[in-house]
Image (cartoon, rainbow, N blue to C red):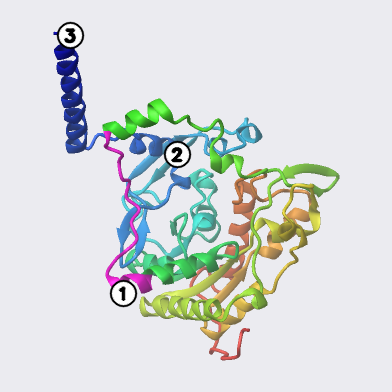
Amino acid sequence: MRLSSLLLSAISTVIATLSLEIGCRLVGYDFGRQAYLMKRVPIFYRLPTVPVGEVFFRRQGPDHWVGKVLSTGPVPEAYRHEPDLDVTYDGLGFRNPDALDDWDIVVVGDSFTELGNLPYEELFTTRLGSLVRRRVKNLGVSSTGPLTHIFYLERYGRSRSTKSALLVFYEGNDVIDLTREQDDLDRYRGTGIRPRRDLRPQTSFLAALYRMLFRRPPAVAPWAAAFDWRNAEFVAAGRSVPVSVLETAPGRRNLSWGQRNLLEQAVARWGETARRLRLHPWLVYMPCKRRVLHSHLRFRKNAARAIVNWRPTDLPDAMRCLAANNRIGFIDVTPALIEETKHGRLTYNAVWDPHLNGRGARVVAEEMARALTQAGQGAGADVGSAARGSCW
């Protein structure tokens, strides 16, 4: 009798467990709570997930997030005085007011254009609009590269009044992003398979039960533990500030033949696309923190040798040459950022986050405004005929 009761209890448990497993899978219950956890991450640090074009992505929109952006990272104590930021994104997932339906200038780029760590009024695109008294549309999205930016220009960049298109090229990772995007395009055109970034919920009750019973979560998030973030000191004007220096830029000799070819094609396509849309094309060179702080860094023992031994490369010269070859106006904001640095003013976030701070965004806006004003109040770049010399 007792054995029969135990057997009946075991059968009931198995049936109940299988029912839960099937039911949870059918309703799509996410034991990993991915959607909930993703909402806690600042929009700036999320991958864009809405498929557009052949292999490209944009952000969801409209969207809204309130909180401390930099403090969500691995060194929250470095930003203990950070105020809450109220960030909104328009219906297409870009940092523009919903009412912006006509604009004079469009600026396209990656995270250095989006700058989701800053309030809207401090973006260099917003400041640029005030300085040149023109309406500016921001098409900046993190984790995107030049091919995505060309697509953004074509799909979202032109309005009735648009005259100028500025592509912000970030030397820290745009060559890598360009290579990845071309690989995705080649794979899609050969197989029909495009990359996926949609969240895939963990709907298995049994898998969730196993994790709860037998797997312990790490004491520290692996991605945070992998880095010792404070690897240098910014020394200038009699003061020293701990900083993270994590990215460098390649030079001409560091680029493979394939990378050079991709850069040539991308810059040419940018110019051709802008002119087809009857826009004046510009290329804005955005340096990484390592280049701007080069003469004002004292490295700590934990700094990687590649970071310590890096010296300013000639990539800006190559990009300037490519712009000239394709009749594209060129703006290098590096000298203006270096000049600010000489006075002891840090233009990048100090620890872990590599992006511009509010001061850096202001310097970039002023340099862009100066170049556009010299060209005729943002009317466009008059660079004459193309000079077809080799840039390598």
Q: Badge 1 is on which residue?
A: 189
Quarter of the image with the C terminus in it = bottom right
Residue kind at label 1, given as amino acid type: Arg
> From the viewer's perspective, is residue 3 above or below residue 235?
above
Judge from the rendering whether residue 356 lies leftward or rightward of residue 327; answer left or right.
Answer: right
Q: Secondary structure at mark 2?
A: loop
Q: Regarding mark 3 in the picture, which secondary structure is present there?
A: helix
Q: Is residue 22 shown in magenta?
A: no
Near-viewer residue (136 or 66)? 66
C-alpha distance separating marks 2 and 1: 33 Å
Disc 2 and disc 3: Cα gap in Å?
53 Å
* Secondary element at image label 1: helix
Question: In front here: 145 or 365?
Answer: 145
| The furthest residue to the right | 238
User: Magenta region's main secondary structure?
Assistant: loop
Residue 122 in the image, given as x and y percentages of width and height: 55, 47
Q: Nearer the viewer, residue 87 or 4?
A: 4
Q: Is residue 99 left or right of residue 25?
A: right
Circle 2 Cα neighbour tier, 10 Å, few/some/many (<14 / 14–19 / ≥20): some
Q: Earlier in the sequence, mark 2 or mark 3?
A: 3
Q: Which circle marks residue 2 in the picture? A: 3
Q: Tell me if residue 58 can be seen.
A: yes
Give the percent coordinates (x, y) of residue 244: 68, 47
Q: In front of the other: label 2 or label 3? A: 3
Quadrant position of residue 63: top left
Residue occupied by mark 2 = 41
Q: Residue at x 19, y 30 (%)?
A: 18
The nearer-to-camera label among 2 and 1 is 1
- Looking at the rendering, the stretch of residues picked out in magenta corresponds to 185-204
